[in-house]
Image: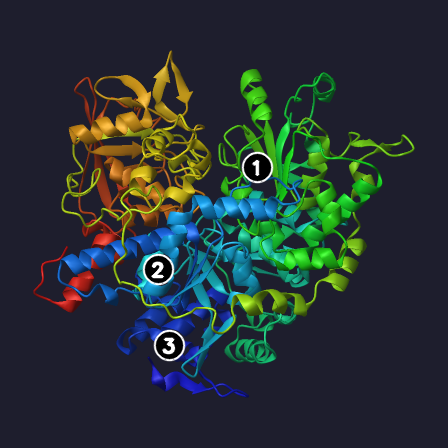
C-alpha cells in the first residue's frame, strides 16, 4: 500500500488513493490522456502494488507498453453455480490433498469475497403456456440437482468469504447489475472502484455501469479467489465512438446484433472496448448493458461505458442507498472517472458506429455475429416456401422450418425493461386481434430478475404474455444455455421421422450449432417482441416483415407493423411501471442481514461415491485419472485426436445441452442407475469428472476433419483411431488412446475456443490425453483455461494452416524449443511415408505467470505446491 498517495475523499468519512497524482509524477499531463480502463488499473496499482514496483508498473500504463506483466487485484469474484460450483469442488478437493499432506484444510478459503448465484441449473421442462410452469420447473430442478445443491450448501458454510444466492432468484449478471455492484467500494475506510471477475463470459454485463468486470474460466477465478494477483499486460484498449440516434422502432437487441457483426469484422478479439460519444450518452443503462453483455460474442474482453448521469439515475432507480449513490458521484468526479473527464482520453484505435444505420434484425444461423436484417430474409434464403409450409400445416404436419422453441431468455435482454415491455405490448395487440401461438411452438419467458414480474404486472402486460404462451418458467439462465428442456414426444418423433428442419428463435446471445436443443438444427437470435411474433408465425420460412401473421376479427390481414409498439408507448409504460420500491422489495430480503445462518460443518466434504454430479477431483492423485499423473507430458509422438475447422466453440468441446441416452455420457449415467428423464444437462454434471470427461467433443454438430467416410468428413462426435484408420465414436477413441498411453494433439483453425468460459473445454481434453493444441488463433478465456490445465497452446505463423500443411491425421507430432513467452517453437511433423517437416510456431504462454502455471502442470497443482510451501517449506509438494 502506497500511503503517500492516500488522501481524504471530500465530503465523506473515507480516504482514497490519488492515482492522478501518482501518474503525473511519472509524466506531467499523462492522466488526461489515459483511457478509463488505464485509470482504473492505475488506481489499483497505487492502492495495492508493492511500492518498490509501483513506478515501473505505472510507467507501463503511461507509455502503453505491453512487454511486461503487472498485477491486477479484482475486488470480488462472481460465479454461477455451474463453474462456481466446479471451482468450489476443486477447492474442496484441494482441502483433501492438503490434509493428506499434513496441512490444515480449513485454511484453504477464498481470500477475495466470492458471490455464487444458483442460476444455471433449471431446464424448461414445463413451458410458458402451463400456469404452474415455474413451480413445476423448480421442483424438477431441486430433485435433479440434490447432490449439487447439497454440496453448495456445505460450501456456503465450510468456506469463508463465500455468499450464495439460492435457485429461483435470477441471473447472476442481472443481480450483479441491479444490486451486487456498488460501482464504488468502501472497505476499511477506503473508497475504490468496484472490479470483478466472473465465471461466465457475459460478466462484462456490469461494464455498463463503468465497472471493470471480465469473464474468466473457473480456474482463473480460483486464482483470484485464493488471493493471487491476476497477472496481465496492458490490454489493447479500443475506443468505440457511437454516433447518431436510432430510428423509430429499433430495440437494443437490434443495436447489439449490428454492433456484434461490425466489431467482429474489426477484429477486436481480446481488446478492452470503451464506448463513448453522443450516441452512447443517450443510451439508457439497460441499452448499455445489452451491448456490454454481448462482449464475448464480438470477441472482446471488456465493454466499458463511462460513469455519467445515466449511471446515477440507474442507481437511484434500482433502489441503491442515497449515501452510496452520492459516493459514486463524488468519487468519480474526484478521480476523473466521470464521463466529462474522459473527453481528453486518447486511444490507439478508434472505431466509429452510426446508430442511425441500425435496422431491425436477427442473428443466425449458427453464429451471433451473422447479422440478418429482417428485411433481407427472402434474399438470404431464410424466408421462402411459405406456401409449402402452410400446406403441411393444413395437412396436420409440422411445417418446413418449424419454430419448435421460442424463448424470451437471457441476461442480454431481460435486464432491459424496454425490451421486455416491447414484447408485452406486442402480445397485447396480438391478443386483441385474435392471434395465437402455433401449437408446436414451445414458448417460455425466463426473466433475469424477479423485478420483471413486478413491473409487468404493474403495467398489465404479464397476463398478455401468458395468453400467448410466454408465462414465466424460471428466473434463471435457461434456453440460451442449452437448458430448453424436452419437446413434446409426438413433436420430437415427427421431427426425427421426417428429418424435419426445425429451428429455434430466442432473445439470447448464443446460437451455436447444437447448443439450444439437439433437434433444433438452426437457431436465431432476436429481440423479445420478434420472438413473440415468430411464435405466432410458427416457421422460420416466414417473411416476418411482409407475410400475414393472421386475420383479425373483421377478416383483415395482420402483419408485424400492425403489432409493433411505438417508442412512445414503450417509454410511457417504463416510466409509469418501473420504480425503485420494486427493486427494494426483491433485493432487501435476498441480501438482508441474518440471511446466512452460522452453521458448523466439517472442513472436509463427505464425498458421495455414487454421485454423478459431485466427485472428488483427481488432479492431485498420484495415480491420476485419464491422462494426468499416469501420463507425464512429453510433447513427443503425439497423435492427432481431431483436426478442426475455424470457429470451434466451447460448445463443440464440451456441450452444455441435454444428455441423450445414446451418448457416451448417457450410457454412463444409465450404468450408474440414473433414469433417462433425470439425465439433466452436461453442464450440471461438471462436478463429476467421470461424466464430464465423456462429454468431451460430444456435440452432435462437430465436424472432425479426420472422421472421413467415403471422402466426406462426417458430422457428429467422431474421431479416427490411428494407426488403425478406424472411424469411431469420440469417447471410444479417447478410451483406446488412454489405454495405449498415447499422447495427443489437436490441430485447429481460427478463433479456437470462442464462446462460454467453460473450464471443461480444457479439463476434458487434458484428461483425454491432449498435451498440445496448435491453432491459427485462440479466444482469450479458453487459452488461459488450457494453460490452467497444463495444455500448451501453440499458434501457427500467419499463412500456415492445417490445410497448407496437407495434414490428414495419420501424422505423428513433436514440439520442441524453449517455452518462453511468445518464443518460437518447432512443430515437427512425421508423415506416414517417412517425410519429416519442421514448422516454426509461436508459444502462447503470454506471461511469466502463465509459464509458471504450465510448468507446474496446471493451476490446481500449483495451488497445492504453493500452499504446502507456505505452511511448511520442508514439506514435499503434492
Residue 861 visible at all: yes
Taking the spot 31% from the left edge, 20% from the top edge, the residue there is 728
> What residue is pinned by disc 3?
47
> What residue is pinned by disc 1?
370
Secondary structure under the numbered disc 1 in the rendered image: loop
Q: Position of residue 31 (x, y in %)?
A: 47, 74
* Placement of 14 over or under 812, stated as above or below: below
Between discs 3 and 2, the one toward the N terminus: 3
Between discs 1 and 3, the one toward the N terminus: 3
Instruction: Name the side, left or right, on which 27 lies relative to 563.
Output: left
The disc label shown at residue 155, or none: 2
Residue 35 visible at all: no
Instruction: Name the side, left or right, on which 644 lies relative to 744.
Output: right
* Placement of 33 over or under 645, stated as above or below: below
- CA distance separating discs 3 and 2: 31 Å
Q: Quadrant of residue 233?
A: bottom left
Secondary structure under the numbered disc 2 in the rendered image: helix
Q: Position of residue 77 (x, y in %)?
A: 41, 62
The disc label shown at residue 633, or none: none
Amino acid at each position: 500500500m502506497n500511503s503517500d498517495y492516500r488522501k481524504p475523499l471530500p465530503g465523506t468519512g473515507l480516504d482514497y488513493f490519488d492515482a492522478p497524482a501518482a501518474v503525473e509524477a511519472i509524466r506531467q499531463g499523462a492522466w488526461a490522456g489515459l483511457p478509463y480502463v488505464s485509470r482504473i488499473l492505475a488506481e489499483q496499482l497505487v492502492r495495492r502494488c508493492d511500492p518498490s514496483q509501483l513506478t515501473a508498473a505505472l510507467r507501463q500504463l503511461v507509455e502503453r507498453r505491453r512487454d511486461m506483466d503487472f498485477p491486477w487485484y479484482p475486488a470480488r469474484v462472481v460465479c454461477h453455480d455451474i463453474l462456481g460450483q466446479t471451482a468450489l469442488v476443486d477447492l474442496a478437493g484441494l482441502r483433501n490433498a492438503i490434509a493428506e499432506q499434513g496441512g490444515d484444510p480449513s485454511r484453504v478459503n477464498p481470500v477475495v469475497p466470492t458471490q455464487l448465484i444458483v442460476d444455471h441449473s433449471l431446464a424448461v421442462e414445463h413451458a410458458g403456456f402451463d400456469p404452474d410452469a415455474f413451480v413445476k420447473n423448480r421442483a424438477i430442478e431441486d430433485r435433479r440437482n440434490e447432490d449439487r445443491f447439497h454440496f453448495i450448501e456445505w460450501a456456503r458454510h465450510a468456506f469463508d468469504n463465500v455468499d450464495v444466492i439460492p435457485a429461483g432468484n435470477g441471473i447472476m449478471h442481472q443481480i450483479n447489475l441491479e444490486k451486487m455492484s456498488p460501482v464504488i467500494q468502501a472497505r476499511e475506510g477506503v473508497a475504490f472502484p468496484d472490479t470483478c471477475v466472473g465465471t461466465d463470459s457475459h460478466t462484462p454485463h456490469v461494464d455498463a455501469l463503468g465497472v471493470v468486470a471480465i469473464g474468466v474460466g473457473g480456474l482463473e477465478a480460483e486464482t483470484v479467489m485464493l488471493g493471487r494477483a491476476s497477472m496481465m499486460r496492458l490490454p489493447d484498449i479500443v475506443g468505440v465512438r457511437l454516433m447518431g440516434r436510432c430510428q423509430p422502432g429499433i430495440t437494443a437487441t437490434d443495436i447489439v446484433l449490428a454492433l456484434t457483426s461490425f466489431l467482429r469484422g474489426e477484429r477486436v478479439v481480446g481488446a478492452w472496448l470503451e464506448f463513448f460519444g453522443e450516441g452512447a450518452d443517450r443510451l439508457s443503462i439497460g441499452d448499455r448493458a445489452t451491448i456490454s453483455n454481448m462482449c464475448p460474442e464480438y470477441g472482446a474482453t471488456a465493454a466499458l461505458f463511462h460513469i455519467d448521469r445515466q449511471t446515477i439515475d440507474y442507481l437511484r432507480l434500482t433502489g441503491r442507498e442515497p449515501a452510496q449513490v452520492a459516493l459514486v458521484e463524488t468519487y468519480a468526479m474526484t478521480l476523473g472517472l466521470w464521463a466529462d473527464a474522459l473527453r481528453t482520453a486518447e486511444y490507439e484505435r478508434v472505431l466509429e458506429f452510426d446508430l442511425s444505420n441500425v435496422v431491425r434484425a436477427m442473428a443466425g444461423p449458427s453464429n451471433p455475429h451473422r447479422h440478418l436484417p429482417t428485411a433481407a430474409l427472402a434474399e438470404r434464403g431464410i424466408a421462402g416456401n411459405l406456401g409449402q409450409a402452410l400446406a403441411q400445416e393444413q395437412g396436420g404436419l409440422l411445417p418446413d422450418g418449424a419454430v419448435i422453441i421460442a424463448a424470451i431468455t437471457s441476461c442480454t435482454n431481460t435486464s432491459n425493461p424496454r425490451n421486455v415491455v416491447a414484447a408485452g405490448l406486442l402480445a397485447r395487440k396480438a391478443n386483441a386481434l385474435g392471434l395465437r401461438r402455433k401449437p408446436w411452438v414451445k414458448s417460455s419467458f425466463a426473466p433475469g430478475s424477479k423485478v420483471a414480474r413486478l413491473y409487468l404486472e404493474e403495467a398489465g402486460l404479464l397476463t398478455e404474455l401468458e395468453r400467448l404462451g410466454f408465462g414465466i418458467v424460471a428466473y434463471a439462465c435457461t434456453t440460451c444455455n442449452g437448458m430448453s428442456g424436452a419437446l413434446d414426444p409426438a413433436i420430437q418423433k415427427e421431427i426425427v421421422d421426417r428429418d424435419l428442419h426445425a429451428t429455434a428463435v430466442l432473445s439470447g446471445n448464443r446460437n451455436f450449432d447444437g447448443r439450444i436443443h439437439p433437434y433444433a438444427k438452426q437457431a436465431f437470435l432476436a429481440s423479445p417482441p420478434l420472438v413473440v411474433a415468430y411464435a405466432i408465425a410458427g416457421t422460420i420460412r416466414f417473411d416476418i416483415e411482409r407475410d400475414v401473421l393472421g386475420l383479425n376479427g373483421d377478416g383483415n390481414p395482420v402483419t408485424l407493423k400492425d403489432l409493433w409498439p411505438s417508442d412512445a408507448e414503450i417509454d410511457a409504460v417504463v416510466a409509469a411501471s418501473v420504480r425503485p420500491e420494486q427493486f427494494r422489495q426483491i433485493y432487501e430480503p435476498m441480501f438482508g442481514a441474518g440471511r446466512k445462518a452460522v452453521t458448523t460443518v466439517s472442513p472436509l466434504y463427505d464425498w458421495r461415491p455414487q454421485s454423478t454430479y459431485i466427485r472428488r477431483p483427481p488432479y492431485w492423485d498420484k495415480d491420476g485419472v485419464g491422462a494426468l499423473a499416469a501420463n507425464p507430458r512429453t510433447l513427443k509422438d503425439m497423435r492427432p485426436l481431431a483436426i478442426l475447422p475455424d470457429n470451434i466453440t466451447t460448445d463443440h468441446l464440451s456441450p452444455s445441452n441435454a444428455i441423450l441416452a445414446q451418448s457416451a455420457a448417457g450410457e454412463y449415467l444409465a450404468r450408474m442407475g440414473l433414469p433417462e428423464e433425470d439425465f439433466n444437462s452436461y453442464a450440471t454434471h461438471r462436478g463429476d469428472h467421470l461424466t464430464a470427461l465423456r462429454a468431451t467433443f460430444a456435440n452432435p454438430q462437430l465436424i472432425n476433419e479426420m472422421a472421413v467416410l467415403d471422402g466426406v468428413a462426417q458430422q457428429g462426435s467422431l474421431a479416427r483411431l490411428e494407426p488403425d484408420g478406424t472411424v469411431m465414436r469420440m469417447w471410444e477413441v479417447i478410451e483406446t488412446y488412454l489405454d495405449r498411453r498415447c499422447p495427443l494433439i489437436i490441430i485447429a483453425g481460427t478463433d479456437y475456443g470462442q464462446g462460454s468460459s467453460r473450464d471443461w473445454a480444457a479439463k476434458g481434453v487434458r484428461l483425454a490425453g491432449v498435451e498440445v493444441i496448435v491453432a491459427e488463433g485462440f479466444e482469450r478465456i479458453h487459452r488461459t483455461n488450457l494453460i490452467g490445465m497444463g495444455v500448451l497452446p501453440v499458434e501457427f505463423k500467419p499463412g500456415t494452416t492445417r490445410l497448407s500443411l496437407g495434414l490428414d491425421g495419420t501424422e505423428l507430432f513433436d514440439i520442441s524449443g524453449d517455452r518462453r513467452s511468445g518464443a518460437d517453437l518447432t512443430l515437427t511433423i512425421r508423415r506416414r511415408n517417412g517425410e519429416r517437416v519442421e514448422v516454426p510456431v509461436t508459444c502462447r504462454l503470454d506471461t511469466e505467470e502463465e509459464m509458471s502455471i504450465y510448468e507446474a502442470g496446471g493451476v490446481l497443482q500449483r495451488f497445492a505446491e504453493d500452499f504446502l510451501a507456505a505452511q511448511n517449506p520442508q514439506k514435499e509438494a503434492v
